[in-house]
Amino acid sequence: MRRFVVETIERAGPSASPPVTIGIGMGGTFDRAAVLAKRALTRHPTGSPSPDPAVAELERDILDAVNATGIGPAGFGGTVTALSVHVEAFPTHIAAFPVAVNLDCHSHRVREVTL
């Protein structure tokens, strides 16, 4: 899963308008994984770790791996390709391990509104 996410970021490159926030959904059916990825992307506050210690460790590991790609802000190179990685997980059978990745550029995260 980690390799899949990093390859997804590498393929997106500067087109994703890095630095990005990465929402990852894993488990359930693929439909569920896609919803989880969207939910992960909207975790508040941005950068807050998962309450599950194993998932929080996975988030840190993926963030380090993505930032090691060297894509950097706007694709000009550097060590900040992603600002945060949020993972939401759901039980599933390992033979059908669905993973969905949702990217959000940094400009969507600079303001906050309370309704």
Image (tube, rainbow, N blue to C red):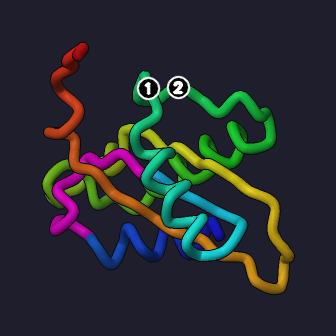
Q: CA distance from mark 1 to mark 2?
A: 7 Å
Residue in the foreground of this view, choosing between 97 and 83: 97
Residue in the foreground of this view, choosing between 48 and 12: 48
Please tell me whether residue 79 belongs to the stretch shown in magenta: no
Q: Position of residue 37 (x, y in %)?
A: 49, 56
Helix or strand or loop: what does disc 2 sit on? loop
Q: Amino acid at mark 2?
A: Ser
The residue at the point 71 percent across, 28 percent down is 51
The residue at the point 48 percent across, 46 percent down is 39
Q: Quadrant of the N terminus?
A: bottom right
Q: Residue furthest top?
A: 114
Please tell me whether mark 1 or mark 2 is closer to you in this view: 1
Question: In the visual, does 54 lie left or right of 66?
Answer: right
Q: Position of residue 45 (x, y in %)?
A: 42, 22
Q: Are marks 1 and 2 in contact (CB under 8 Å)?
A: yes
**Is residue 79 something that shows in the picture?**
no
Read off the magenta span: 13-22
**Is residue 85 something that shows in the picture?**
yes
Label 1: which residue?
A: 44
Question: In the visual, does 103 lie left or right of 77?
Answer: right
On screen, 5 above or below 52?
A: below
Residue in the foreground of this view, choosing between 51 and 29: 29
The residue at the point 67 percent across, 74 percent down is 29
On screen, 56 above or below 93?
A: above
Label 2: which residue?
A: 48
Q: Quadrant of the C terminus?
A: top left
Q: Residue furthest bottom?
A: 95
Label tally: 2
Q: Please tell me in which quadrant of the rendered image residue 13 appears.
A: bottom left
Q: Position of residue 17 (x, y in %)?
A: 17, 56
Helix or strand or loop: what does disc 1 sit on? loop
